[in-house]
Amino acid sequence: MAQSCRYFYEDFSEFDADAAKKHLRPVARQPLEVVRDKLSAITDWSAENVHHAIQATADELEVGMGKVGMPLRVAVTGAGQSPALDVTVHAIGKTRSIERINKALGFIAERESQQ
């Protein structure tokens, strides 16, 4: 169990290959950029406000929650499974979550350059 929760207290060096292949694709770039900006703007860091930022991103882009949530989940946890996303992002923390989203965006850019 401790192994599956490492992303809460330890940074990861690589994304899960299957999760990244499926969810960190070029189409995920815009949702990740928008949700990153909305998370950055939160002044009262709470799971509720994180949830609102994720929902607002989906609403703004007129996409389902999965188009935002799954790339975000892989970005912040390195894997395709985690507890509730808003609670997970909140627990990981604002700074670390944003750093990990930026890392995922770099991964996507690298992937795009290889195509």
Image (tube, rainbow, N blue to C red):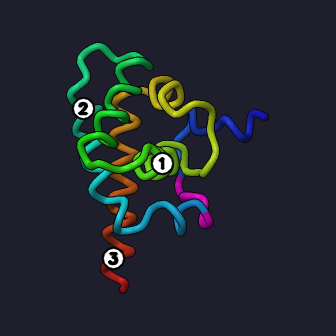
Q: Quadrant of residue 7?
A: top right
Q: Is residue 39 left or right of residue 76?
A: left
Which three-letter amino acid code belongs to the residue tagged 1?
Gly
- Residue 85, image x, y percentages: 52, 34
Q: Mark 1 highlights which residue? A: 66
Which three-letter amino acid code belongs to the residue tagged 2?
Ser
The residue lying at 36 percent from left, 35 percent from top is: 54
Q: Spatial distance from mark 3 to mark 1, Cα to Cα?
A: 21 Å
The magenta region covers 13-18
What is the residue that sits farthest to the right in this orientation? 1
Determine which of the numbered discs, if any, sits on residue 40 in the image. 2
Q: Earlier in the sequence, mark 2 or mark 1?
A: 2
30 or 75, which is in the foreground? 30
Q: Are marks 3 and 1 in contact (CB under 8 Å)?
A: no
Residue 14 drawn in magenta: yes
Q: Is residue 110 left or right of residue 90?
A: left
Which three-letter amino acid code belongs to the residue tagged 3?
Glu
Determine which of the numbered discs, if any, sits on residue 112 in the image. 3
Magenta segment, prevailing SS (helix, strand or loop): loop
Q: Spatial distance from mark 2 to mark 1, Cα to Cα?
A: 21 Å
Q: Earlier in the sequence, mark 3 or mark 1?
A: 1
Q: Is residue 21 left or right of residue 106?
A: right
What is the residue that sits farthest to the bottom in this orientation? 115
Q: Quadrant of residue 38?
A: top left
Residue 114 drawn in magenta: no
Eye-nearest disc, 3 or 1: 1
Packing grade of label 2 (10 A; few <14, some 14-19, many >=20) is some
